[in-house]
Amino acid sequence: MRKIPNFVLLRAFEAAARLQSFALAAHELHLTPSAISHQVRELEAFFGRALFVRSHRRVDLTPEGRRLAESLERVLDALEACCGEVSLAPSGQVLSVYCAPSFAVKWLGPRLPAFMQAHPGITIRMSSGAEPMDLTVAREVDVAISYGHAVQRPGVEVVSLGQEDIVPMCAPRLKPSGRPWKALMAEATLIESQLSDVTWRDWFVLNGLAMPQNPRQSFDRGALSISAAVDGMGIALETTRFAERELARGDLVEVGRTVFRRIRREVHFLSTRTNERHVEKICRFRQWLTAEAGRAAPAVRP
């Protein structure tokens, strides 16, 4: 027998903690506020400590209650994911993929139809977030693709998805006519990607140029920076992986492709659990993803 309290008590506590109200928790669970209060007190008796600080119109979590609420949220998310797998693909396999947002929308998403066609028995369930995922905690996630760095833990395998070219890009109409690219870099509006590990200062130092002091636009996602550059807001410094389509269509051009030095970095990483390396759905996805990442980028317009 596991040493855990009755699930009914945990359910009442989770609802009250999330809603910060016994009355709202009672409404959600179709109980009375006094029933919620009784169940919470029974749970507090089980632990031998208070989980809430009660006031007239609301309840606040104690430090112990907050730790329990955060852990319960992860456990219930995992339970919900397991139930979803059963109902979503009863005769197949569900692969839970956690991915950095811009990589998901700009690079992985456009390629997923090919994976689905090659592996019709595997259903993808995608979630995204900017922070790297710890697979030792998020047991409901099968594979994680992170930006910048991956969480290193015993029992977790991390592989790089290869080096990427990080270059300045702009809309073709910003390309100077009869003037050198260096003149444009000194005058144009620069677009910052807030979460990028590569900064404009890195690029200007690499190319031996003075950093201009012009006001800069700023976005918290690489995909948004790419979109802003397409719209002519300025010059974005981003990985060409995020702009494959825009460069191929001519919506963006690389600034000074034959003039400036490129920055090359490993910035995306795939994480899987060591003890699941031979699970078929994970093995197939890992092989497909690393093969796609190793392919040459499509040709771009000069």
Image: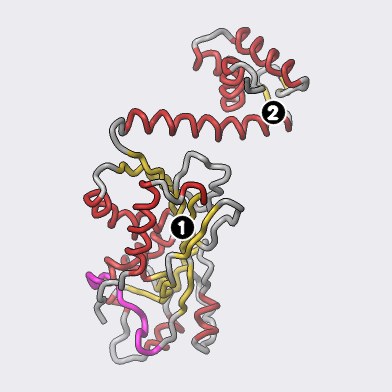
Mark 1 and mark 2: span between their CA atoms?
Answer: 34 Å
Q: In this figure, which residue is indicated by the disc labeled 2?
A: 65
Residue positioned 57% across, 18% down in the render: 7
Q: Quadrant of residue 111?
A: bottom left
In this view, the residue farthest toward the front is: 278
Of 291 and 181, which appears nearest the observer?
Answer: 291
Q: Quadrant of residue 243?
A: bottom left
**Residue 234 magenta-highlighted:** no
Q: Would residue 203 be found to the left or right of residue 297 on screen?
A: right
Residue extent of the magenta highlight: 248-259
Residue positioned 57% across, 45% down in the render: 136
Q: Any mark on residue 130, and which?
A: none
Q: Would residue 247 be found to the left or right of residue 16 on screen?
A: left
As drawn, 180 above or below 90: below
Question: Which corner quadrant holds the C terminus?
Answer: bottom left
Q: Amino acid at mark 1?
A: Leu
SS for callout 1: strand
**Residue 255 magenta-highlighted:** yes
Of 43 and 204, which appears nearest the observer?
Answer: 43
SS for callout 2: helix
Could you tell me residue 22's position as x and y percent? 61, 16
Could you tell me residue 71's position as x and y percent? 61, 34
Residue positioned 40% across, 58% down in the render: 103
Could you tell me residue 91's position as x and y percent? 28, 33
In this view, the residue farthest toward the right is: 48
Q: Amino acid at mark 2?
A: Gly
As drawn, 121 above or below 284: above
Residue 277 in view, yes or no: yes
Q: In this figure, which residue is indicated by the disc labeled 1?
A: 270
Residue 21 in view, yes or no: no
* Magenta stretch prevailing secondary structure: loop
